[in-house]
Amino acid sequence: MPLPAKILIVEDDAHIRRLLHATMARAGHVAVDAADARQALALLDIEKPDVVLLDLGLPDRDGLELIQHFRKRSAATLIVVSARDESAEKVAALDLGADDYVTKPFDTEELLARIRTALRHQRHVEAGDVPDVIEAGGVRIDLDRRRVARGDADVHLTPKEYGVLAELARRPDRVLSHAHLLKAVWGNAHVERVEYLRIAVRGLRQKLEDDPSRPQLIVNELAVGYRLSLRASSERR
Ligand code: CA
């Protein structure tokens, strides 16, 4: 059972706002609501939320612009809840500092799971004990020793494959954009070279997935990026 968190809901649609509020309350969280960007910024300072659920289509200000303001003023986890199913916008939101996104109509269980993941990560960071070993889908990633094992066997990865896997493993269950991964592993000069990333991910899947054509561990977020799924299970385990 996760500790309750304070959740700031930023949504101009009253129906969705009430639905989100009820969902958060039912999960034991404390929810505060804002109907526009002005209220949201005021409540951010007063309430100091742990998590912000942000609708990108607000009446008084562009949601993407709001992300930048939030990031300067708060360490809260920022989850974009948007009707806009456009990958360019998701990428922009992530690269501006959003931690995650869900697309409306959203599955409330999925949203609560994303919040749990975010809170767990946030609390690890605050306590200064970000885990060095990540296990999912029968794969064990030891970030301290730079070792990866599948079942009992060590897996040999190329430096770029390891770089991509380690970057994903440091933020498990969160989407990292193509540009984020390319910048982290190949450097600023190569942020456009999505094909580098595809090759590394293909290699990782061949070495780590039960069925590389149906990946469970390194999940595609179409036209946005990749996510390391902690919910991956393995038949071999
Ligand atoms: Ca809206």
Image (spheres, rainbow, N blue to C red):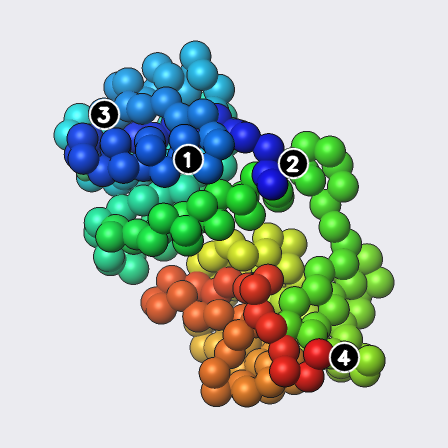
Residue pointed to by mark 4: 151
Estimate the spatial distance between the alpha carbons at disc 2 and disc 1, rounded to whole Å. Answer: 21 Å
Cα separation, mark 2 vs mark 3, equals 28 Å
Residue 106 image point, x, y percent: 30, 52
Residue type, mark 3 in image:
Ala
Q: CA distance from mark 3 to mark 1?
A: 21 Å
Classify residue 29 as left or right of residue 37: right
Outermost residue toward the top in this view: 46
The residue sitting at 74% across, 69% down in the picture is 140
Measure the alpha-carbon separation of dots 2 and 4: 29 Å
Q: Earlier in the sequence, mark 3 or mark 4?
A: 3
Which numbered disc, 2 or 1, marks the residue that appears first in the sequence? 1
Marks 3,1: beta carbons within 8 A: no
Q: Which residue is mark 3?
A: 35
Q: Amino acid at mark 2?
A: Arg
Q: Counting other residues with Cα less than 10 Å from the Cα at mark 2, is it few (<14), some (14-19), or many (20 or more)?
A: few
Residue that numbered label 2 is attached to: 123
Vertical placement of residue 125 versus 143, above or below: above
The kind of residue on which mark 4 rests is Gly
Decide if residue 68 is on the left or right side of residue 231.
left
Residue at (76, 58) in percent of width and height: 133
Q: Residues within 10 Å of mark 3 (few under 14, many from 20)?
A: some
Percent coordinates x, y for residue 111 in the rendering: 41, 48
Labels 1 and 4: the sequence-earlier one: 1
**N-term mark: 2 or 4:** 2
SS category of the residue bearing label 3: loop
Tell which of 62 and 8 is nearer to you: 8
Give the distance between the C-alpha atoms of the residues marked 3 and 4, in whole angstroms.
49 Å
- Quadrant containing the N terminus is top right
| Total numbered circles | 4
Residue 224 image-quadrant placement? bottom left
Pair 2/1: label in front: 1
